[in-house]
Image (cartoon, rainbow, N blue to C red):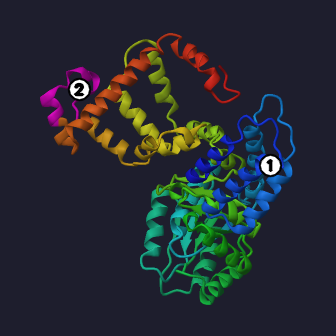
Amino acid sequence: MFDSLSERLAATVKKLRGQARLTEENIQDTLREVRMALLEADVALPVVKEFIARVKERAVGKDVLNSLTPGQELIRVVDEELTEVMGHANEGLDLEEKHPAIILMAGLQGAGKTTSVGKLARFLKEKADKRVMVVSADVYRPAAIEQLETLAKEVDARFYPSDSSYDPVEIAEEAVSAARVQRMDVLIVDTAGRLHIDDKMMDEIKRINAAITPDETLFVVDSMTGQDAANTARAFNDALPLTGVILTKADGDARGGAALSVRHITGKPIKFLGVGEKTAALEPFHPDRIASRILGMGDVLSLVEEVQQKVDHAKAAKLANKVKKGRGFDLNDLQDQLAQMQKMGGIASLMDKMPGNMNIPDQVKKQATDGKQFDRMIAIINSMTPQERRFPDIIKGSRKRRIAKGSGAQIQEVNRLLKQHLQMKKMMKKFKGGGMRKMMRAMKGQMPPGMPF
């Protein structure tokens, strides 16, 4: 997300290198470039105008602080203003002391409402330990109810059955009663969408809202629609008492205009980002962290949180102990590491949060976004015998052909996997004894501030 905007801003601040002071003259061209970068990212024009005015007011005439370059000073100002545009800090859901707390989901057809219901149910169960019920009041879209039922089973949420012959308002009211009787903590109500805003759709969702008086009314919008996302958000905000926004398909949006526009236009916080198709691909929206990503400074906090939540720490400790004792790194270990990376969203998700990510070559980024890459590598390892996984050196010509055929891969892919394993094995040898701490100390200058090395 934000790749194109990050690249443009990075190129822009480079032009200020060597300047001792930010002035009207040397910043004018820079601000013009920033303005063009934002417009190309499909940020709404009123947002761009106000943003540029605020950056100019704060940046012009400021002396460079200590050893900071003008480019770094500008980045600091832009970082703070981006955070301001998107809303300071993450705003969570208001679900406490309500039984059940009711969440109403609204948005256009195709925005990802039903999928977001499943993701949100999983998030609340796993992160907030809530008992969650979901219900579909979408009686128009074919298989909408069945889709939600399937998602509910996947995330282990309670599903309230509904029928396309019922009135959506009655479905919502009955679901509230059922959730109350079954002592659910949260009820999430999925509603019908349309391909465009129309009076009938708005009237129906207004009636549902009036009947169940939800504690949270979340507007679900496709981030790839850019300025249209902001305009649609305004229409829903005029019709409903929105409390927040979920931006979906953020992983496929290189521009990021919706994230910068929606908050400004509606005045409502973006609460979550949908960053993939899987039910675990939902992130709380932290404006300060997103601003850091846009400016290529990464998002170390989110990266650390993901590691804490998604990595199997028992397996990690076992591998660390194995490597420390010099017992080698075999293909079983590599398979475990690939599985762990998949749980964290793959290489692309990790790269997006790493500092300096915009300096990563395009070819590497392109390979990282291939979500099936890990699947292919794991399939190759699965086609090996237990002995081959433990002793990869025995894998020669005939074995390679058998493994390639069994996994549906090319022999070149098998060779590439074995080469990658060998490189990792060599690296792991350096970690034997106190090698890892020595290496991390040597890398200290390249690590983010505050790392304990």
Mark 2 lies on a secondary structure that is helix
Q: Quadrant of residue 282?
A: bottom right
The residue at the point 39 percent across, 18 percent down is 426
Determine whether label 1 and label 2 are within 8 Å by CB.
Answer: no
Q: Which residue is mark 1?
A: 25
Residue situated in front as seen by the camera: 117 or 415 = 415
Q: Is residue 33 left or right of residue 405?
A: right
Q: In whole angstroms, how far apart are the C-alphas of marks 1 and 2? A: 66 Å
Quadrant housing residue 424: top left
| Whether residue 321 is visible | yes
Label at residue 388: 2
Q: Amino acid at mark 2?
A: Glu
The image shows residue 417, relative to residue 439, as above or below, that is below
Disc 1 marks a residue whose amino acid type is Glu
Left or right, 391 with reference to 28: left
Q: Tell me which segment is drawn in magenta.
A: 384-402
Q: Residue at x 63, y 55 (%)?
A: 130
Looking at the figure, which quarter contains the C terminus? top right
What x and y, as percent, mark residue 51?
77, 58
User: Which residue, as the protein is rendered here, is positioned at the far left?
Assistant: 398
Q: Which mark is residue 340?
A: none
Write the residue at 81% across / 43% down. 22
Is 389 within the magenta? yes
Q: Earlier in the sequence, mark 1 or mark 2?
A: 1
Query: Which residue lies at the image location 74% right of the left edge and 60% below the top edge?
Result: 94
Taking the view exactly as shown, the residue that stands out farthest to the front is 25
